[in-house]
Amino acid sequence: MMLFGAGSGHADDKGLWIADDPQRTAQHLYDPCRDGRLSDGKPRTCAEIRRMYGGTRWGDWPDPDLSLDACSDGRVSDGRPRTFSGLLGSYFAFANTHPMIAFATVYAAAVFVLFLLERYIPYERRWLLSDGETVNDIGHTLATKGLLQLAGLVAAVFPMYAATLQPLAALKFGLWPSDWPMVVQVALAVVIAELGLYWAHRIAHEKLFFWRFHALHHSVARLWVINTGRFHVADSLFKLAMSQIPLYCLGAPLHVFWWLGAVTAFMGILTHCNVDMRTGIFDFVFSTPRLHRWHHSKDLREGNMNYGENVVIWDLIFRTYYNPNRPSSIDIGIKGQIAPGFLKQLAQPFTKEGVRQILGRPSRGS
Ligand SMILES: [Zn+2]
Ligand SMILES: [Zn+2]
């Protein structure tokens, strides 16, 4: 991190400059562009940058009108104030940790409550028994989430990474209605992102090339709150790209992405939980446990339906909505075999033999 007039020092864990002489730190100017300037030409201290990037509660994240240019090209080109367009992941470097901790705490509490409800009012009692996959489930959840964090870190550490996004940034049309109430913006983001999620998910079921990755998620013989995040990292990246790039091009501000992530995280644990809950009319709006159980059915007439991750609007429009008037399926899983062990599961889609096992085809050797 280069600073002008800062003297000697080092970058802290948020990527902010800390001078060796603490007296000077607060006066030092932070230069995210590495050319000694901010986009509006206004110098800012570290403390100000911290305030700008680090909210302490939801909704406090970077101001959409923030004029700091995160420098997709390493320079301030026209001095025009911009939204935080360069890189999605930079907040990992700039935001203080409180929102992350708050989110993680609420999320862990929700998982715990669902875990308890699963024991009191399970939809399927057999699904309370271990399938020997819990460690792998957690491993895939952490790998997928960790990859996102890593992408953010890479984006923050290497500004050149952002330069590769420049053509994307140029696609931004600035159509996003930033002046609408936040709740409406988030609802809009959920529906737009869902279109990408829907097609990524549907393609993953209909094209063998993508199914080889998605099959891991469907290989479970029980549904419960812990296997919500059991996705192959390649599957997750595909979904992420399909769902978030349109929002990025529309110019959605960063905190909308945060809220979208929160909605998706909570809907995920809900759709997978083994709790016998009545969802009634919500089945026509949200992806509920009832609808998602059909999606996990071994019977492909049921399983290749209900692709919605958060909401079901695109299933309704593209005629893949499935909600017959009977209890949803408990006969779930795939016809093929998933490798035992976390690393083998990650590698399996990349070998011919592995793909044959996933598809349930006879091995070459047999
Ligand atoms: Zn699926
Ligand atoms: Zn699922």
Image (tube, rainbow, N blue to C red):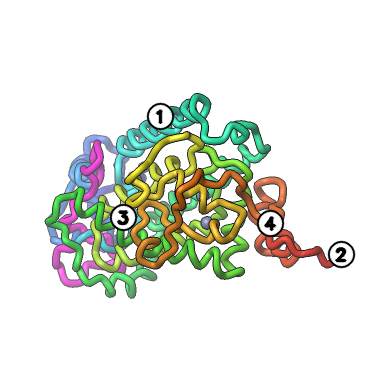
Residue closest to the eye, 296 or 342: 296
Q: Which residues are magenta?
A: 53-82
Q: Residues within 10 Å of mark 4 (few under 14, many from 20)?
A: some
In primary-sequence order, the first of circles 3 and 2 is 3
77 within the magenta span: yes
In primary-sequence order, the first of circles 1 and 4 is 1
Task: Please give the label number shown on residue 190.
Answer: 3
For the point 51% across and 46% down, the residue is 328
The residues tagged by marks 2 and 1 sit, at their Cα atoms, a distance apart of 48 Å
Can you tell which quarter of the image residue 250 is in?
A: bottom left
Contact (Cβ within 8 Å) of mark 2 with mark 4: no
Q: Position of residue 8 (x, y in %)?
A: 32, 46
Task: Please give the label number shown on residue 335.
Answer: 4
Q: Residues within 10 Å of mark 1 (few under 14, many from 20)?
A: few
Residue 8, can we see it? no
Residue type at the position of mark 4: Lys
Where does label 2 land, which residue?
365
Mark 4 CB lies closer than 8 A to ligand 1? no
